[in-house]
Image (tube, rainbow, N blue to C red):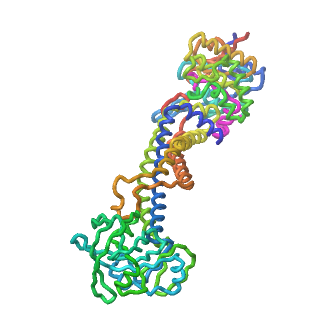
Amino acid sequence: MNERNNNADTKKSPLGDLGVAIIKTNQLIKRFPMGKGEFTALKGIDLEFGTGEFAGLIGPSGSGKTTLLNILGSLDSPSDGEAIVLGQSVSKLSAKGAARLRKESLGFIFQSYNLLQVHTVFENVEFPLLLLNYTAAERKKMVMDALEWVGLTDKVKSKPPKLSGGECQRVAIARAMVKRPSLVLADEPTANLDAANSHNILKTMETLNRELKTTFLFATHDEKVIGYLKRKIFMKDGLVDHEEIVNN
Amino acid sequence: MWLAIKLAYRNLIGAGLRTWLNVIVLSFSFVVIIWMKGIMVGWDHQAKTDMANWEIGAGQYWHENYDPYDPFTFSESHNEIPSQLESEIDKGTMTPMLIVQGTIYPQGRMQQVILKGIDPDQNVLKLPSAKLDTAITVLPAFIGQMMARTMKLDVGDRVMVRWRDAHGTFDATEIEIIDIFSSNVPAVESGQVYIPLQSLQQMTGLENRATIFTFSNEVMGRDAVAGLVLKSKSDLTKTVDDMIKTKNSGQSVFYFILILLAMLAIFDTQVLSIFRRQKEIGTYIALGYTRKQVVGLFTVEGAMHAIFAAIVAAAYGIPFLAWQAKIGLTMPVDTSEFGIAIAQTLFPVYSVGLIVTTTLIVLIVTSIVSYFPSRKIAKMNPTEALRGKIQ
């Protein structure tokens, strides 16, 4: 295991050799208004991630990991500095451009699954494909493939309220992966799951990462998740404290 | 747009009871508005048909001095029957009527009436004039049901009638009520006594003279006749049009309240949705929707309530409206007392225009009501929405 500090030569992805950099942040700062003043959640983050990484932002609550994930997911914009995701500067993206980036290239997995409650499992997983104008036949095949990856082909007609937490999160993974995105951002994906379900989910994601070469970036403080990560970026008070690389 | 419709459909169907409660309330508005409008159209149609059948035919020529609302004009409102109208009268497509003021004395009481001389052979109006062609010793007369009730007269009753002739001399005779008709048209019943035209002309010394001429064929561009004023059917039914217009305005308040209630339900659902479905809104944005598209989706969802309501309304409304068109709406009180041309039973008439207009109005209003609360989504922070944080 290598351990490195957040200095100039640690900006680059240590797994960058696997492919081109798909995320690059440069002195990324995010401030939020708080009362009459401001709270700085990110205080100048310099990071780079390459294709096919299985990395995580690790830190306690308030360390800035979710804020960073939101910016990289173009759900939020930086106050200063730059975040380039798949060759596009997040701060320069229009609302439409950001939506297109999310629609075409990003997958999200959330702590509380965020499934559409009144839609069936099939419809939840189909949703990103509807936005991308796939034909019904293409959608059906892609959805069934995705559900096969997560082992939920027998639940296509079920609705989220009828599923267990683990099953819901597997649906969320299928939804994130169905369009074969370049990057999946997962915010505390195992926080609501027990140990067995957490390991199941993580193994699924690890397999997808390995087989589809999709980059996974987690925000977590769950030891179970940390154990699976190939690259661990420890954050503290809005800064990258240090990094660890796991060599197999 | 197609995607928004598809998703809105899924969301509404998935929402179950919440959707169907709104849809039922809204469908109720559809049916009631169409039914009430149908009643008004039916009334309009019935009033004009009854007026044409019993009172005005396809139009009339009036003596230039004749004012039906001023009996003092009657003594000056009669002409020699113009020669240019004689051919129509002979053919039976026009009938003259002489109108004079009179007084009757039923059971010792005195009552002002209008004496109308009508040709017993006429077929222009539905009035039972043929019954005047009878051989009795006194003057035969028929009256309307409303008149019979107020005067307490019945068929076979004899009553004294008094009038003034062309020279202003009073004269009197006895008449016998040979028939009582019912018409739904108060203007032909109230205070009117019908006697043979020729008898009235002789009684008043106004031989071959008449006040009005009613024709059965509506001929465009009728010739002007000296001393007479041409009154078209639309001129003569203007009072009905005005009355229906007034009634429609009054009913609009009711429609407004009805739609308001339905819209309140939609508005409430939309506002509640935006608060309760924050996470869902955030998810749509995370998956690639713009906030504008989410606003569009929620607006379509709201508007789709109106489409569902139209379908539900059709399911139970078509049989109900058809049944109503068949049996009509019977007034709980005697409509002859209303003083307006209204049948005891009103039969609603529905037109395609009425149904399309009502549907479009409800759809547009529902869309507007759905859009306003949805605009709030455009100001939402997606990261907060994703966490379900109320904004």
Q: Quadrant of residue A147?
A: top right
Q: Is residue B23 above or below residue B348?
A: above
Residue A26 in sight from this viewpoint: yes
Q: Which of A186 and B156 is in front in this view?
A: B156
Residue located 71% across and 27% down the image: A140
Q: In this view, does B259 lie above or below A151?
A: below
Q: Is residue A238 left or right of residue A53?
A: left
Q: Is A7 colored magenta in this rendering?
A: no
Split into 4 quadrants, where in the image is the N terminus of chain A?
A: top right
Q: Nearer the viewer, residue B372 or A52?
A: B372
Q: Quadrant of residue A108?
A: top right
Residue B267 in sight from this viewpoint: no
Give percent across and percent down for residue A142: 72, 26
Q: Residue furthest bottom?
A: B167
Numbered-mark total: 0
Residue range (magenta): A88-114
Q: Nearer the viewer, residue A9 or B2?
A: B2
Give percent across and percent down for residue B332: 35, 52
Q: In this view, does A7 lie to the left or right of B93?
A: right
Give percent across and percent down for residue B321: 50, 48
Q: In this view, does B8 lie above or below B83?
A: above
Q: Is A93 colored magenta in this rendering?
A: yes
Residue located 38% across and 54% down the image: B331
Give percent across and percent down for residue A228: 66, 13
Q: In this view, does B337 lie above or below B122?
A: above
Split into 4 quadrants, where in the image is the C terminus of chain A?
A: top right
Q: Nearer the viewer, residue B186 or A91?
A: B186
Q: Residue furthest left?
A: B108
